[in-house]
Image (cartoon, rainbow, N blue to C red):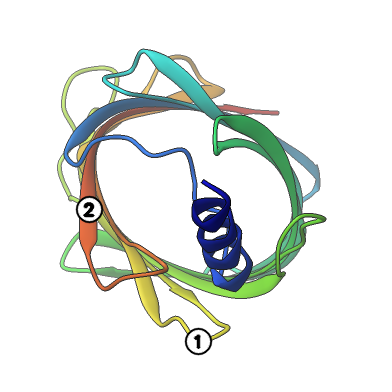
Amino acid sequence: MKQAKIIFFGLLFFSVAIPAYAYDNHDFQLWNTDVQEFKPNKSSKIILEEEFHWGNNAGDFYYQHYDAGYAYMLNKYFNFGGGLRYIKEKKTDKFRDDSDPYFLFLTYWQLAGFNFSDRTRIEYHYYDYQANFWRFRNKMDIKMPWKFTKFNIQPFIADEVFFRFNGIDLNENRLYAGFAFNITKNLTAELSYLWKANKNSNTTNWTDTNVLSIKTKLSF
């Protein structure tokens, strides 16, 4: 028994990070995101965001984050900004904190009626229980040139890749397919299916997750 404890703590010490609370491969999850966006002037945005995740076939609450960010709109093609995200995530059956300052760079363009946006995000993950690390994310969104009904239902697809530094390269990919639509003049929403693939930090094995994502945005 004593030898088993030594092996366990040795593996924990040499691991890159404390693992997230594990769910079965191909788990179904529910994610909810709520955004509030304020425009103090024509070239600035203040963005507040809350997000919540339920795993284990959407029966176990395991993740939440609160985000405060600022974006400067240089022109209709290019924005940049930054912010701070506070995360509480269940790890080894216990919720732990993570504070993430980040920088954002966004570009927008149109081609043949399709609306493209590309977001580059650089994050620094700060912990008091494991090694800190930098992470690079890039997300490409494509909105189709078609809108349906008075709610302007518009199909979209997106792909986001994650690169974590400190010796790990590509370790996560998210593919989205769904619909954006208007609820009221100032309230919009997105309903999408998200397929998420993750590489374990200690192995080369990949696992995937099926997510129903619901997002709302209130603009002032």
- Dots 2, 1 in contact, CB < 8 A: no
State the residue at coordinates (24%, 36%).
24
Say which amino acid is labelled 2. Thr
Determine whether 119 is above or below 92 in the image: below
Quarter of the rendering occupied by the C terminus: top right
Q: Is residue 165 left or right of residue 203?
A: right
Secondary-structure class at tag 1: loop
Q: Is residue 198 left or right of residue 98?
A: left
State the residue at coordinates (55%, 82%).
165
Image-quadrant location for residue 110: bottom left
- Residue 177's disc number: none
Determine whether 41 is above or below 119 in the image: above
Which of 34/155 is in front?
34
Residue carrying label 2: 207
Q: CA distance from mark 2 to mark 1?
A: 20 Å
Badge 2, how many Cα within 10 Å: few under 14, some, many 20+?
some
State the residue at coordinates (43%, 17%).
60
Q: x and y percent of residue 219 in the render?
A: 63, 30
Residue farthest along the bottom direction in this orientation = 167
Q: x and y percent of residue 43 in the render?
A: 75, 59
Residue carrying label 1: 167
